[in-house]
Amino acid sequence: MSLAVCLLIDDPADAAIRQLWRRLEDVCVPSLATHTHGRHVPHLTLAALRTYDIHAVQAALAGLPVAAPAELLLDALGSFRRSRCWLAPAASADLVARQEAVVEAALGTGADLHRHYRPGSWIPHLTLAPRLHTTDLPTVARIVYDVLPLTAPVSRAALIETSTGARHRLDHLV
């Protein structure tokens, strides 16, 4: 199990992403909607912690300055070589600085950060299909580009336990 520090988007953008998930499922492309425990929410992960003390992480993140309001501009489709397909937000200087501050605070608790979330290696993304077959990529692209561009205001943040989907609010990161 890991713990993810996530930004969550407002209700209209959340509904738009969930509609994308449904459209993918309708064409037999498994989406995040049905992946593992089925409690996933549209999110952007700032840090994934492999080992952690949740109370120490919460306290460390509470010590960060209140973040300025943010919007994610989603205008591209991406994929990782292990088949994960995602929407790519523009990586603004504020978003990168927020991610670096979250990582520094979490590491200060002794947490073990997943290597893909190290500053300089992190690729911001909102997952659509976690197990995409490359033969499905044209279908996914057609569906996604019917919807993009999409502006997704960040409305809240949470610690999410990845094995269960349990969420713990982080009011000060938004």
Image (cartoon, grey):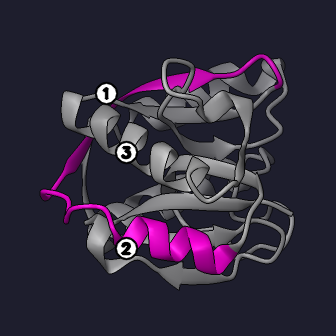
Q: Are marks 1 and 2 in contact (CB under 8 Å)?
A: no
| Residue displayed at 33% across by 32% down | 96
Q: Secondary structure at mark 1?
A: loop
Badge 3: residue crowd in 10 Å (few <14, some 14–19, many ≥20): some
Q: Position of residue 149 (x, y in %)?
A: 27, 35
At 33% from the left and 68% from the top, the residue drawn is: 63
Categorize mark 1 by other alpha carbons within 10 Å: few (<14), some (14-19), many (20+): some
* Residue 156 in the image, given as x and y percentages of width and height: 33, 72
User: How far is disc 1 from disc 2 in space, using C-alphas?
Assistant: 24 Å
The answer to which of marks 3 and 2 sits earlier in the sequence is 2
Residues 70 and 22: in front is 70
> Looking at the image, is 141 positioned above or below residue 153?
above
Mark 1 or mark 2, whichever is nearer to me = 2
Residue of label 2: 62
**Element at badge 2?**
helix
* 161, above or below 120, in the image: below
| Residue 22 in view | no
107, 145: nearer the viewer: 107
How far across and how far down the image is residue 99, in percent?
A: 40, 42
Region of the chain picked out in magenta, as a range: 54-82
Residue on which the image places disc 1: 91
Which of the 4 image quarters holds residue 173? Answer: bottom left
Q: Position of residue 136 (x, y in %)?
A: 76, 26
Q: CA distance from mark 1 to mark 3?
A: 15 Å
Residue, x 76% and y 42% (percent of image)? 130
Q: Is residue 133 magenta?
A: no
Amino acid at the residue labelled 1: Ala
Question: What mark, if any, has residue 101 been given in the picture?
Answer: 3
- Please give left or right for residue 22 compared with residue 133 in the image: left
